[in-house]
Amino acid sequence: MIRNSISVVWTTIALICCCSSSTDAFSLGIRPTASTRSAFSSSSWSTQSTILQRSAGQRISQSAGAARSTSSSTTLWMKSSDIPPPYPVRIAVMGGGNFGLAMASIAARQGHPTTILVRSEAVANEINTNHTHPTYMKGITLPTKARATTKPEECLTDATYIIHAVPCQYSRKFLEGVKEHIPAGTPVLSISKGIETSSLGFMTDILEDVLGEDRPLAFLSGPSFAREIIEGVATAVVIASDDLDLARDLAFLLSDDNFKCFTSQDVIGVEIGGAVKNVIALGAGMCEGLGLGTNAMSGLVTRGCNEMRRLGVTFGARPSTIAGLSGKHHS
């Protein structure tokens, strides 16, 4: 009964998303029914693109006429989640904090060999031996396909995708130390959020400064507590990238029955929503802690969201992105 209810929820969300130009329902990984397959069997998106080869630096597709559009929803790319990717996938997660562990668990649950890059040999041994972290996620057992190492050359050089989970203020120094082990063209998904205090840059700026402007990049944000992700509580997030195909690939690889990834090309909108909403959340927590009442908290959140929207528009973001998943409070 609970599983059926969750399916109804995701299907409803998918129908809503079909009305948005920045998100497609098929990026959710929802398994189409037999009737759905039959209804769409003659549609262009079901036969137009045949994936020939995918690797970290090479994304080639054979098209029956024209290339897939990355800015229009007239040609939708869809894969059943029953079908494995036509290329070997290895995931590297840089950072072993709460959210790094959560994303490593998500990737490993999908059957992808996943390696977490941590600083301490003791932490790596604990994860590899007992499948637990000595400090974070107490009481949580990590999937057996997730392992850890302290050596960047062991996990970054052959990774198909790299997930960056190092806090924003430490990201630049960390990336400078490991960039020689990251092959050119390997896509990086950043789940770190914030504005660097020294440069006032977003994670986009940091990653491009250190890893190069030609690096394929994607950014994840949304209302998501790390522990609830690992526990399998229903969660929805958004993955944004200038390359919509990359965002869809990542959404397909990470989505399951309980963790759904929407896609967008509004990178700056997702970045601003991910960074600024946490400031508003902290302010709301202060209101509660100081006993200022619901009126004060409601006023702060309302005006804060309005300011966040205006900031986003100033930087060229779409207001709908700020009002979406990336602008919702989470930790």
Image (tube, rainbow, N blue to C red):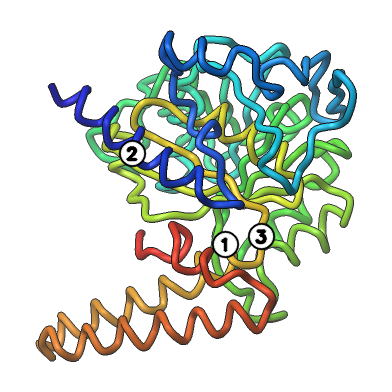
- What kind of element bears circle 2? helix
Q: Which residue does the image show at 76% across and 43% down from the upper left?
A: 70
Judging by the rendered image, the residue that carries numbered circle 2 is 12
Residue 270 is tagged as 1
Badge 2 amino acid: Thr
**Rendered image: mark on residue 106:** none
Give left or right: position of 224 versus 183: left
Q: Which one is in front in this view, the residue at disc 2 or the one at disc 1?
A: 2
CA gap between label 1 and label 3 equals 5 Å
x and y, in percent, of residue 262 in the image? 51, 43
Residue 208's place in the image compared with 263, above or below, is below
x, y percent for residue 6 = 25, 31
Along the viewing direction, whichever of 243 and 15 lies nearer the viewer:
15
Q: Position of residue 175 (x, y in %)?
A: 73, 54
Compared with 172, 51 (above or below) is above
Nearer-the-camera pick, 103 or 45: 45
CB under 8 Å between discs 2 and 3:
no
Rate crowding at label 2 as few (under 14), some (14 to 19) or many (20 or more) other CA atoms within 10 Å: few
Q: Earlier in the sequence, mark 2 or mark 1?
A: 2
SS assignment at label 1? helix
> Where does label 3 land, which residue?
267
Q: Are marks 1 and 3 in contact (CB under 8 Å)?
A: yes
